[in-house]
Amino acid sequence: MAGYAGSVNAILYHNIGLFILILALLDEDTSIWEYLIRCGLLINMWCQYYVNNFVQWGFIVSMVVLLVTLVLVRHYRTKIGPNFRYRLPIAVFLAADFWFTLPSRPAGMVVTPGIAAGAVLMFFLMKLSTGRQQRRFFQNLATEHLANYDELTSTKNFTAYQKDIFNHFGVARTGKQPLTVATLDIDHFKLVNDQYGHLAGNQVLAKVAQALKEIVHQYGEHYEVYRTGGEEFTVIFPNSTVKETFQIMAHCWQAIRTHEFDYDKQTIKVTISSGMTELYAGDRSPNDIYKRADHSLYISKQNGRDTITVNGATQQLQDDSNQVKYAYFVRGVYADTTPVRRIAEELQLRRYDQTAQQWVLPQQHYLDIDTRIELMRTALLNTRTQVLVKALPVADFLNQAIADKIVAFINGPDGPNQLYIELNQIPALQVLVPMANFYHANGIKLVLSQIGTNRHFTKINASLDYFDGIKFTVAAQPDQMKASKEIKFWGTLAASRQLGFSVDGVTDQRLFAWLRQQSFTNFLQGDYFGQAQLPLLAE
């Protein structure tokens, strides 16, 4: 390659590569994983110049300086990113660390102190020449931010909502994808302002917004929170159904109602009301969805606030186990062996309806973990097997205090031999990994359920390494050809990742026989084997 003897062209060539990698590091809008990848690329390039010289003092010194600088850049990224007066000296400092510590003949070049000084000067001029463009770029970003973000809460504003919902609506209609919208507001917020003052109200509003963003982004970076009114927020869930996203809103509801907001040595507690809906075939504009969600929010307020209403139906969220009787029914999980063998009990919650004098499937509900563990303990006394399968909301899965209680239960004298936890939502990878490791370290296995159709593949693929199994549920009246294709897709994927594969929704002999012929099926569930029963009655 031209100029590898230490010429100006060679220095320019290497400086361009260094310039690009350092420029990428100073981007403040990168996730931790993106930043680590960029750091890895820079370190890899750095090491290329020290082949056969890794034990020299120059490499050790330069690498220590580089690593410390990378940590500091990440820590202070929000201050460094938009400020050229910080970016310039940091970039030049890294360039000096690179050039002045190189061995005498790196990568075929000859590097003397004079050549190194000239290279750093060239890098400085390159960086300086981009200053105007970078300032203009960040000025444009600042202008765009002011136009699309609410200053108080740092959430996107109503203008951004109108633009985004229009785009998501078009994508959903064209691609035949689901789209869910949730509206919510803080209950009796005027009383907060009247009792504690507007400054306190502003702080509560900002903290609620922060909590909403943190929770929503745990489930997907493409989900977004908007401030669309005084104390009203709207959440858009692209490519997601109400069933898939209800847990997210329940997580928000529970987190906010249990949080204590501190202001001027005073503790303020608030609750939220919410309404949810999804795209209907007859919707002609995004306003149709918003009006339906807003109407459900109105119903939540009419029904006493502090709740969530989905498509006009207010959900039971608060723990009412002290007034209503609950129990776990069990349904068998069968190993695909000859003959099939019942190897586990799936727990399904039921509520006793005093009026109808029968057990019924409850609406969306909330029971505290102590109540649920006691119900599990009761069910376990009368079950045939000592292996339990329990669905757990993601909000509870991510709660370390709840995880500790579950671990204490399974390790206790009256705990099950094995517990499988089913998740029907995947949190963001950075919060999934530590909790998955915790559960696995304590002998609990994780199953991803309700994987639905293939549109979810890209969402879950990166997370499958942290699960022990996949469960596919066949629709009540399935398109047989479509169902068989999806079962084969997920079953083959599970086999390739060495994951257990379970098929739920087996209702007839034909489906049962077909699944028995497939090499990837490990477990079977469904009414074909019998409906869920009280453990005392279960065979």
Image (cartoon, rainbow, N blue to C red):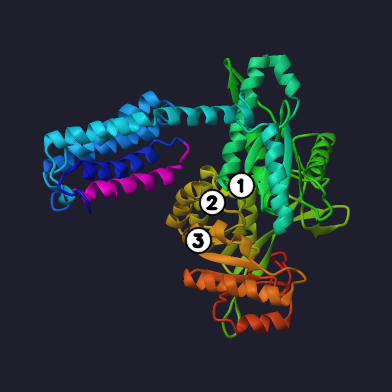
> Crowding at label 2, few (<14), some or many (≥20) Cα neighbours within 10 Å?
many
Quarter location, residue 32:
top left
Name which of mark 2 and mark 3 comes first in the sequence: 2
* Image position of 470 with respect to 130: above or below: below
**Depth-wise, is mark 2 or mark 3 nearer the camera?**
3
Q: Which residue is mark 1?
A: 369
Left or right of residue 529: residue 151: left
Label located before the other in sequence (1 or 2): 1
Q: Is residue 267 left or right of residue 319?
A: left
Mark 3 surroundings: few (<14), some (14-19) or many (≥20) residues within 10 A: some
Circle 3 residue: 464
Report which residue position mark 2 lands on. 406
Q: What's the magenta bit mostly, secondary-structure-wise?
A: helix
Q: Residue at x 18, y 32 (%)?
A: 117
Q: How far apart, in angstroms, are the residues tagged by discs 1 and 3?
A: 26 Å
Q: Where is residue 15 shown, x and y percent of the image?
A: 27, 41
Q: Is residue 485 above or below residue 32?
A: below
The span picked out in magenta is 29-49
Under tag 2, what secondary structure?
helix
Q: Nearer the viewer, mark 1 or mark 3?
A: 3
The amino acid type, in three-letter code, at marker 1 is Ile
Looking at the rendered image, the quarter that the N terminus falls into is bottom left
Q: Percent from the top left, x then y, of residue 530? A: 72, 74
122 falls in the magenta region: no
